[in-house]
Image: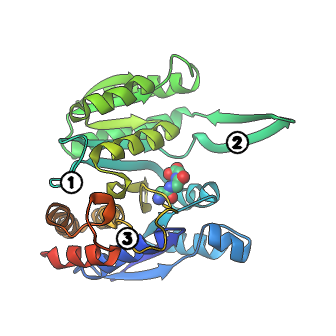
Amino acid sequence: MAHEIAVIPGDGIGGEVVPAATTVLAETPADFEFVRGDAGDATRAETGAALPEQTRTVAAAADATLFGAAGETAADVILPLREVVGSYANVRPARTYPGVGALAPDADIVFVRENTEGVYAGIESEIADGVRTLTRVTTEAACERIAEFGFTYAAENGYDQVTIAHKANVMRETDGLFLDVARRVGGEHETGYETALMDALATDLVMRPETYGVVICPNLAGDVLSDLAAGLVGGLGLLPSANVGRENALFEPVHGTAPDIAGEGVANPTATVLSAAMLLDHLDHPEVAAAVRGAVETVLAEGPTTPDLGGTATTDEMTNAIVTQMDF
Ligand code: GGG
């Protein structure tokens, strides 16, 4: 039976890279039915809602969702969409690929980011003229769930080092709880772990990226540190992600809408195509996912590539090259 995939391009280059990924998926031996959903800045301008009810319904009913990018309406689109699919772990692999001119020649880091709470819980207020507050939410249950996910991911994917990122010396209650719980969970697993203050970790990720494996992070730290790692491995155009829940999942490039190049047809499709490969893994097609990754790696090494990687190819040219290289 065909897998039903909710396809939500969103804004900016989302409208270019998501069709690239569905083109790749459609050329695989797996069987898909794509159901389109609208969301984002343009959708809000047209309908008044950044995430219309119909799009929520499409995502909730699908076997998995492929999302592009959100702009000004990110908080009204991607955060509730993650809720709709019940996701709690945002997995963001940052790898160096042969042939890509990267600052880090040998990085293979996977950020496992808690994505239901922290400072992204959306509890903000203006309590007086010129005074605004934000409430951070940290629960023992969510800390345990993300730590368990991170250590299990490390064991199942051959990573022998886990780093727990935190800032518990300043945010003593919230990151203190995150750190305590993640340490306890780490003690129940065989994979070795260390803890790291997230500011010092940012420096060390730049100086010694090859020493890191899985990095378990609170929500905001994971968002920021994974973008930093993108800079190390060749740019945001290369980082895929999976938002994983107990039963459902949403896949999206780590990058945003890239308004500077949106509409020019030169957006790098790699991050979204690799997100589609993560979707294939999730739907239990590991061989097909491996073939897609192999094709992406060949094209990154041999070209043609888009301008962000030093090439002159359009999104369509790079996508077609990936399709041509797929070997099932
Ligand atoms: N595809 C990633 C995207 O749309 N990013 C926009 C953004 O601000 N995301 C916040 C987040 O990932 O939590």
Q: Which mark is residue 123?
A: 2
Q: Which label's residue is closer to the chain start, 1 or 2?
A: 1
Q: Position of residue 163 (x, y in %)?
A: 33, 30
One can see residue 51 in this view:
no
Q: Name the amino acid type tagged 1.
A: Val
Q: Which residue is mark 3?
A: 266
| Residue at (48% x, 74% y) in the render | 263
Q: CA distance from mark 1 to mark 2?
A: 40 Å
One can see residue 109 in this view:
yes
Q: Position of residue 99 (x, y in %)?
A: 16, 55
Between residue 130 and residue 144, name the one nearer to us.
Answer: 130
SS for dot 1: loop
Q: Which label's residue is closer to the chain start, 3 or 2?
A: 2
Q: Position of residue 192 (x, y in %)?
A: 24, 27
Q: Position of residue 300 (x, y in %)?
A: 20, 62
- In screen coordinates, is 126 left or right of 70? right
Q: CA distance from mark 3 to mark 2?
A: 37 Å
Task: Name the front one of labels 1 and 2.
Answer: 1
**Marks 1 and 3: in contact by CB < 8 Å?**
no
Q: CA distance from mark 3 to mark 1?
A: 17 Å
**Marks 2 and 3: in contact by CB < 8 Å?**
no
